[in-house]
Image (tube, coloured by chain):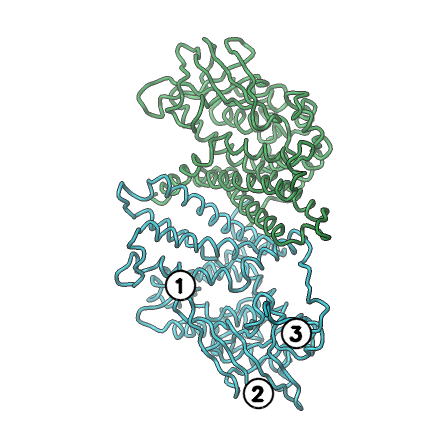
Chain colours: A cyan, B green
Amino acid sequence: MNFDDTPQEAEFRATARAWIAASAPKQYEEELRKSSLGRTQLKNANILEVAKAWQKKKADAGWACLHWPKEYGGRGSSPIERVIWQQEEGPFGQLSRMFIIGHGMCGPTMMAFAREEHKRAYLPPLASGEKVWCQLFSEPAGGSDVAGLRTRAEKDGDDWVINGQKIWTSGAHYSDYGILLTRTDPTVPKHKGLTMFFLDMKSPGVEVRPIKQASGASDFNEVYFTNVRIPDHQRLGEVGDGWNVSLTTLMNERSAIGAAVSTGFPELFEYCSSLMLDDGPAIEDRAVRSKLANWAVKASGLKYTSMRAISALSKGERPGPENSIGKLVAGSMIQDVATYALDLQGAAGVISGPEDSELAGRFQAMLLRAPGTRVEGGTDEIMRNIIAERVLGLPGDIRVDKDVPFNKIPTKGRG
Amino acid sequence: MNFDFSDDQKQLRDQARKFLTEKCSPKAVRAVLDGKAPYDKELWKGLAEMGFLGVAIPEDFGGAGAGHLELCVIAEEMGRANAPVPFSSTVYLAAEALLIAGNEAQKKKWLPAIASGEAIGTLALFEDKGNPSPKTIKLTAANGVLNGVKKPVADGAIADFALVAARTGSSGRDGDISLFIVDLKDGGVEVKSLTNLDPTRGQAEITFRDCKAELLGAAGEGWSILTQVLDRAAVLCAFEQVGGSDRALEMGRDYALDRIAFGRQIGSFQAVKHMLADMYVSATLARSNSYYGAWALSTNAAELPEAAAAARISATQAFQHCAKNNIQVHGGMGFTWEFDCHMYYRRANAMALGLGSLSYWEDQLIDRMRKKNAA
């Protein structure tokens, strides 16, 4: 049992470290290090531009999308090298956020299902960050139940005509392309009538409207499709096989091993270490210590769970299912941590403006952003279902709509 | 990076599981639970023959000379089987204290006897309510004899020898405490069994009256030795707790798959699935924290105090959580004496207190994290 690199891993790490030291935008390092959930901005620069520039620089030197094949803009690296890169990239990894969906989900789906000429044309600029992609699955009528989506695709000559609405689309407002899950046959049970495409987000009839979130920020969008035409050669997978194609996408989302999940604990521990309460330092208060200790072991538990998965990668094995707990644990933890940090501030905790609040409103921003973490990318409840069914082998839910043609499924709960 | 047990260690785990499945069935555990014997003597003998009692004891002292990682995988299996034997008292506490602080003669006398199953040892630390602290120790040592009362002492009624924390000074500092070793068969002690939460592991009160005792380690070093012993035991107990958590989770999962209510498997109801998923989460966090503890223990790393406290807290929480919700999944049947669920519930809650309770370890963890950050 050890934390040591193999000689090859050590060599890769040294090369990556040297290149990052020489190339990374160091002027933003401190700000990026201090960013936390709900607050990832740069004071004097547009973070999207900084992120694109860093991604392009990485791509030019062969450090973009490490695990992708070289011909599609990657480096052909092993999974463990990808993890080492993430460790070495450190705070600069914050700049990859806008590419997560494109690199983690759209790219792998294109690789598995697109025509060769499309892969060669579209994947390298996706890897280099010159083009940004989004994922158009969720709808007002289909969130956790994504297969309940209603956006229609109807064949018209060599094209498909798209009408409908998507929602919760991260980054649609700055995306160039998207992968789109549609319903091509409403007369068969819901999982069987779906088909996947990719499309140019600048196509006529695509309209992106930002959603103002509960936090006040706008990371997500609604996307409306009105008679949008997509050529049939941009179809991914067979007609009616969209559900299976989407599973490839979602599996890639969940296999992002070693990506650090944000728990808020380091921020809270640091805060409590310097905070003075009426009767002394917060860190010496028994109640505070008990809370901190309970979160400390969750944070360390997640960290070492991730180390176990990385070890499996290092040995060339497939990591076990342990990593599925990361988002579930971190999501509600960061919400609780933020709530407690404000509790310690008393009435002053209500002030959230960066100018007048504790730590420039860091925990206030965290609190307001936290509910989203428990919903996006699979709600806490869906994550528990996944653990129960795929890890523990418990039966799936009884699905009352399983054998019902899609157009016969009720659409209203009451009246 | 290889943050995992080696293939040999995993093989040892399989071997221990196979052995315990055969020799430590729930029926065997019940014999002790029902008071038919104070502990499972046959099993104890078998553990000695398998070399498990001395796995981390050097060969010079009659052990297998493997190491703490090997002991961790065996501990996990002991917890999974709910073994009704004084393994943690003898192996994690007594043997570790001897290894840390014993002189050559003391090690020669007791370690081979531990490895061969001839001697049961324990630690007599607590004197009543409260957590480990030099302040709580009133039992005195003077002129080589002890006077005072220790309770609870795990496995005290079946132990052959005990390590006893005694007051040898009154400065109000840690240096007031010294550690002694007492042969309980030599007289000067009165032992009384105490009814406790987990009858598969006995608890006792031991009264020392002018009892002859020998220093273990230097005078005034007792608290420092105890702290190290408790840290090591925290990691090893965490593995027992991890094993117990896994077993309780499996029992709940199996019952949820077999039991039909409202015309379907109860494991198809989300209320039940989510409860089991949360148990899996606790057990996984505990296992990962314990692995870190195992790494720190086996390399004697500077991180051990922090890692041990984290493993202790995480594994205690997981075992309590899994054991209580295992009963909940079983419903009324889980609350019967006949079903095995309560044996894990009892063990989980007894283990949560044995080395000092959660609130004590929470406090320790924060102290240790602060020390590390300051360093």
Residue at mark 3: A242
Above or below, A167 against B243 in this view is: below
Q: Chain of mark 2?
A: A
State the quadrant of the C terminus of chain A: bottom right
Q: Is residue A93 left or right of residue B244?
A: left
User: Number of marks in the image?
Assistant: 3
Going from N to C along the chain, the mark reached first, 3 or 2, is: 2
Q: Secondary structure at mark 3?
A: helix
Sequence-wise, which precedes: disc 1 or disc 2?
1
Label 3 is found on which chain of the structure? A
* In the rendered image, residues at marks 3 and 2 fall on the same chain: yes
Q: Residues within 10 Å of mark 1 (few under 14, many from 20)?
A: some
According to the picture, the residue beneath numbered tag 1 turns out to be A38
x then y, percent, for residue B263: 73, 52
Q: Which residue is mark 2?
A: A227
Residue A199, numbered label: none
For the residues carrying marks 1 and 2, which lies nearer the camera in this image?
Answer: 2
Q: Please tell me whether residue A373 is drawn above or below residue A60 in the rendered image.
A: above
Q: Nearer the viewer, mark 3 or mark 2?
A: 2
- Residue most extreme to the bottom: A157
Residue depicted at 67% across the width and 41% down the height: B11
Q: Are marks 1 and 2 on the same chain?
A: yes
Which chain is home to disc 1?
A
Q: CA distance from mark 1 to mark 2?
A: 36 Å
Query: Is B181 on the left-hand or right-hand side of A229?
Result: left
Rendering quarter of residue B340: top right
Disc 2: CA contacts within 10 A as few (<14), some (14-19) or many (>=20): some
Foreground of the two, A20 or A309: A309
Amino acid found under the numbered disc labelled 2? Asn
Q: Amino acid at mark 3?
A: Gly
Q: Is residue B346 above or below residue A109?
A: above
